Image (tube, helix red, strand yellow):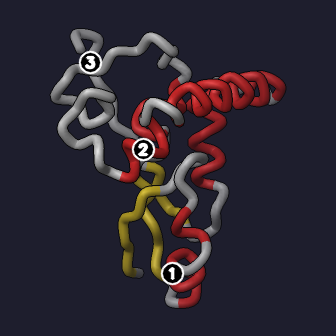
């Protein structure tokens, strides 16, 4: 079996229209990265969140032109996404799950996704 790697999470579903059907038809598995939306689906971010200036998620960061920046962490989108996270947290609680558990289960629920990749950051950050 062949495997490819694509970004896939509750906030980024671009692959579902063309890429995932192709993968399914060709029996290609997907390793989904960004499964927790680069930390957004951990439930630990807040409106006053300040990312390090070298962090690509920083609203002041030099990589502010990235589409992911705009749609996840941009000044207009971040507050809206935090509200969505609150709603998702409540929905996860109805199923007696944490938000990360709920988000990872969602990621893995697509039949073509074989692996949900996550990255952890130490407490010192």
What residue lies at 42% left-to-right and 47% top-to-bottom?
34
On the image, numbered disc 1 is attached to which residue? 23
On the image, numbered disc 2 is attached to which residue? 70
Q: Is residue 89 above or below residue 105?
A: above
Q: Mark 3: few, some, or many residues within 10 Å (few <14, many ≥20)? A: few
Cα distance between the residues tagged 3 and 2: 26 Å
Q: Quadrant of the rendered structure where residue 74 is?
A: top left
Q: x, y (%) of residue 98?
A: 64, 24
- Disc number lying in front (1 or 2): 2
| Residue 3 marker | none
- Disc number lying in front (3 or 2): 2
Secondary structure found at label 1: helix
What residue lies at 22% left-to-right and 43% top-to-bottom?
63
Q: x, y (%) of residue 42?
A: 51, 26
Secondary structure found at label 2: helix
Q: Mark 1: few, some, or many residues within 10 Å (few <14, many ≥20)? A: some
Between 9 and 67, the one lying in front of the other is 67
| Position of the N terminus by quadrant | bottom left
Q: Is residue 106 left or right of residue 117?
A: right
Q: Is residue 85 left or right of residue 2?
A: right
What residue lies at 37% left-to-right and 80% top-to-bottom?
2
Between 9 and 123, the one lying in front of the other is 9
On the image, numbered disc 3 is attached to which residue? 122
């Amino acid at each position: 079996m062949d495997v490819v790697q694509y970004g896939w999470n509750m906030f980024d579903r671009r692959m579902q229209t063309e890429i995932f059907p192709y993968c399914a038809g060709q029996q290609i598995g997907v390793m989904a990265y960004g499964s927790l939306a680069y930390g957004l689906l951990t439930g630990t971010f807040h409106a006053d969140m300040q990312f390090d200036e070298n962090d690509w998620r920083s609203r002041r960061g030099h990589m502010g032109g990235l589409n992911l920046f705009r749609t996840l962490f941009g000044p207009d989108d971040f507050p809206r996404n935090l509200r969505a996270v609150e709603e998702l947290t409540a929905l996860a609680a109805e199923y007696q799950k944490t938000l990360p558990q709920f988000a990872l289960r969602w990621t893995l629920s697509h039949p073509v996704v074989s692996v949900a990749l996550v990255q952890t950051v130490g407490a010192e950050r």
